[in-house]
Image: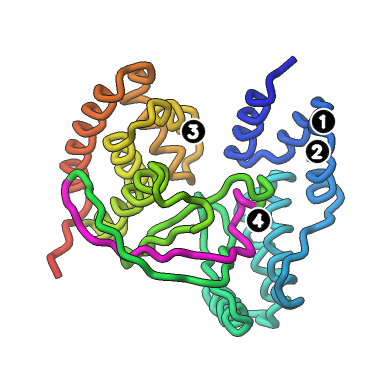
Amino acid sequence: MIEMQTIYETLGGFFIRGDVAGAIAYMKGIPELNGITQAYIDVFENERYVRYDVPDGLNRILLCYQQYFRDVFYLHEDHARAESALFEKLKRELALPDGSPEEVENEMQLRFSRAGFEVLFGKTNGYRGPYVWKETEPVTYEVELPETVSSYRINMLRGFVFRSWMDYLTFGKKGTGGWTSPDGTINCVENEYNVNSERFRVSLLKHEAQHAEDFRRWGDMEPKDLEYRAKLVELIYTRETNLLAKFCSEADPERTDDGHALASARIKSEMGGLIAADIAEIQTRARALFAASSREMERIYRVKAPT
């Protein structure tokens, strides 16, 4: 009999790869998962979509995204065609027959704001999907990084209604815990973290603060470079011996539109042999790779003038 922990790890792999059809097929063979399997069948096979606690017009917008998730992650339709179909549905819903994607997102922003919600559109690891929440509280933290110590504004986000594709695919079990805006503001999904935990202090604060520093120093960088450097920062400061193994398990050099998967693949190539090593050895190697990366970034990206 397969242990449940192994089952959940296998399922996690399906969702990280965006393969809902594979996850459902896998779950159908495990009687202990009958209940959750039926829930996935209801949504993805029978199209009994989720209704959210928002006005009807906003629910219809979120329905367009749910259908897009089904097209991409269950039917495995071509990404470009699925995205085009999403915007055609949104244009009909918003009565913007000739609207550009930017005009469509601006109109949706206005409608959510009028209803009292905050919203962020765009892509997460290559896939469309909004973040919709009720409240933002700014706080300030001082964060130590390998090359600086600075204070950062952290927006604590509360009352989430919708949290993009990974949260949707996993029925709320896994999803983005935070992100950094181009202006350097760090956004944190508050209920995902204990602020006294290493996960908050390292995997959120230090990871996202490194993004903020890299945005400030080098401007628009490729996601794979941003994530590679931020993951190295996590390895420099972590006390968790399994973090390197976690990154290696997420590595996938074939997912060229996923900066996290590409960054993890590079770390696996450069550090995979240290999975069983002492944490101090992992930290030393990560620090050396980070310093080398800073020199590499200087060569690749034009250095921004100080402001």
Look at the image and say whether residue 160 sits in the magenta stretch. Answer: yes
In the rendered image, which quarter is residue 253 located in?
Answer: top left
Of tags 1 and 4, the one toward the viewer is 1
The residue wearing badge 2 is 37
Q: Residue furthest left?
A: 306
CB-based contact (under 8 Å), mark 1 and mark 2: yes
The disc, 2 or 4, on the residue closer to the chain's N-terminal end is 2
**Amino acid type for the residue under numbered disc 1:** Lys
Q: Position of residue 192 (x, y in %)?
A: 52, 51
Q: Is residue 96 left or right of residue 24?
A: left
The disc, 3 or 1, on the residue closer to the chain's N-terminal end is 1
In depth, the one of 237 and 87 nearer the eye is 237
The disc, 4 or 3, on the residue closer to the chain's N-terminal end is 4
In the rendered image, which quarter is residue 134 located in?
Answer: bottom right
**Amino acid type for the residue under numbered disc 4:** Arg
The residue wearing badge 4 is 81
The residue wearing badge 1 is 28
Look at the image and say whether residue 251 sits in the magenta stretch. Answer: no
Where disc 1 sits, the SS reads: loop
**Amino acid type for the residue under numbered disc 2:** Thr
Please name the residue shown 25% across and 24% down the image. Answer: 280
Gap between marks 2 and 3, in whole Å? 24 Å
Gap between marks 4 and 3, in whole Å? 27 Å
Q: Residues within 10 Å of mark 1 (few under 14, many from 20)?
A: some
The disc, 1 or 2, on the residue closer to the chain's N-terminal end is 1
